[in-house]
Image: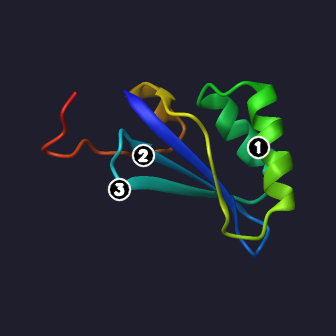
Amino acid sequence: MRIRVDLNRLGTGKVQIAAFRGSSSTGFVLDYPSPKEAREALSALGFSTKEIDGRLEILSELSPKEVLHFAPREISDEILGSSGFRISEPENWDT
């Protein structure tokens, strides 16, 4: 399934990863205590080390709550679920 993943840093230092199915504005957000844990989660979703490190470096320079976007990619429901993301498919979803 095509998934859009966003990344942002909270004022508390936590990192949020949000996953959205297709162009849906409804997704699932998980908070990670540090960039290290966020890096592990992004790696489990299939992002390369280069992509992750680049985004986390930019994120460290941004104000809290500014959002970074990864390019949409295919991520299976199995991988999403095993990573803790529970994204339900909208009833009117077109594939």
Specify whether 12 is left or right of 5.
right
- Amino acid carrying label 2: it is Phe
In 3D space, how far apart are the residues under numbered discs 3 and 1 (Cα atoms)?
A: 22 Å
Proximity of marks 2 and 3: CB atoms separated by less than 8 Å: yes
Disc 1 + disc 2, Cβ < 8 Å: no
x and y, in percent, of residue 16 in the image: 63, 58
Q: Which of marks 2 and 3 is nearer the N terminus?
A: 2
- Disc 2, SS: strand
Mark 3 secondary-structure assignment: loop
> Image check: 73 left or right of 88?
right
Q: Quadrant of the N terminus?
A: top left
Mark 3 neighbour class, 10 Å CA radius: few under 14, some 14 to 19, many 20 or more = some
Residue at the far bottom: name it: 11
Q: How far across and how far down the image is residue 25, in percent?
A: 36, 55
Marker count (numbered): 3
- The answer to whether the residue labelled 3 contacts the one labelled 1, judged by CB atoms less than 8 Å apart, is no
Classify 52 as above or below 24: above
Q: Name the residue under label 2.
A: 20
- Dot 1 falls on a residue whose secondary structure is helix
Q: Residue at the location (40% across, 29% down)?
A: 2
Which residue is drawn at the image coordinates 82% and 50% (left, top)? 58
Image quarter in which the C terminus is found: top left
